[in-house]
Amino acid sequence: MTRYIALLRGVNVGGITIRSADLRALFDELGFDEVRTVLASGNVVFTATDDAASADPKQRIEQALRDRFGYDAWIVLVTRKQVERVIEAFPFDASDAARQPWVVFGSDDAVLDDLVASAGEPDPQVDPIARGEGVVYWNPVKGTTVQTPFAKLLAKPRYKPTTTNRNLRTLQKLLV
């Protein structure tokens, strides 16, 4: 059995509304175990047997979301162990109350590399970023997360199918 976390992109924002109970039911129907949703922002924690995981759960989940809820669904699928490592490796001061500790997850390392390269040399006071294993860490000042140059870059359509971001505090809740 493997403990997974599905990070859905764009759920309960921009007109795509999915109730947690409906999301849980879908994952149950897909044959996953110990399904729970965390917050209302598209986080699903579940376990899968090796048999269930061998059938490419990412594609199965995305297709089921498209079929059931009628939107162009993309997820980043990670294991619990990966999330633990990501949290431990956060390179900025996560206790700094003036900043928002974000982690940008990606299902394609080449896209994450492109994202970092496209950011150039961001101002470390405005847009501190750092590349990690399967992620980009980002630590902007609170209240600026849609205004900074990196935020505007991250919002570009080319990153939508393979990236999603979560606050470090949300990630910690996923492990409880």
Image (tube, rainbow, N blue to C red):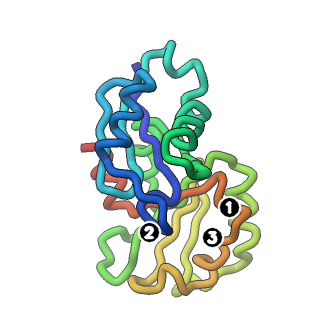
Residue at image location 38% in from the left, 79% down from the top: 99
Residue at image location 55% in from the left, 29% down from the top: 57
> Toward which corner of the image does residue 150 lie, by quadrant?
bottom right
What residue is pinned by disc 3?
154
Considering every residue shown, the one lying at the far top of the view is 51
How many numbered callouts? 3
What residue is pinned by disc 1?
159
Type of the residue with mark 3:
Leu
SS state under label 2: loop
Give the x, y percent position of residue 127. 56, 80
In front of the other: 27 or 132: 27
Give the x, y percent position of residue 25. 34, 34
Marks 3 and 1 in Cβ contact (< 8 Å): yes
In front of the other: 142 or 19: 19
Type of the residue with mark 2:
Phe
- In terms of sequence position, does the residue under pointer 1 or pointer 2 come before the other? 2
Give the x, y percent position of residue 137. 52, 63
Residue at image location 67% in from the left, 75% down from the top: 153
Mark 1 and mark 2: Cα distance apart in space? 23 Å
In front of the other: 157 or 94: 157
The C terminus: image quadrant = top left
Give the mark toward the camera: 2 or 3.
Answer: 3
Picture layout, residue 57 above or below residue 101: above
- In terms of sequence position, does the residue under pointer 3 or pointer 1 come before the other? 3
In front of the other: 106 or 89: 106
Mark 3 and mark 1: Cα distance apart in space? 7 Å
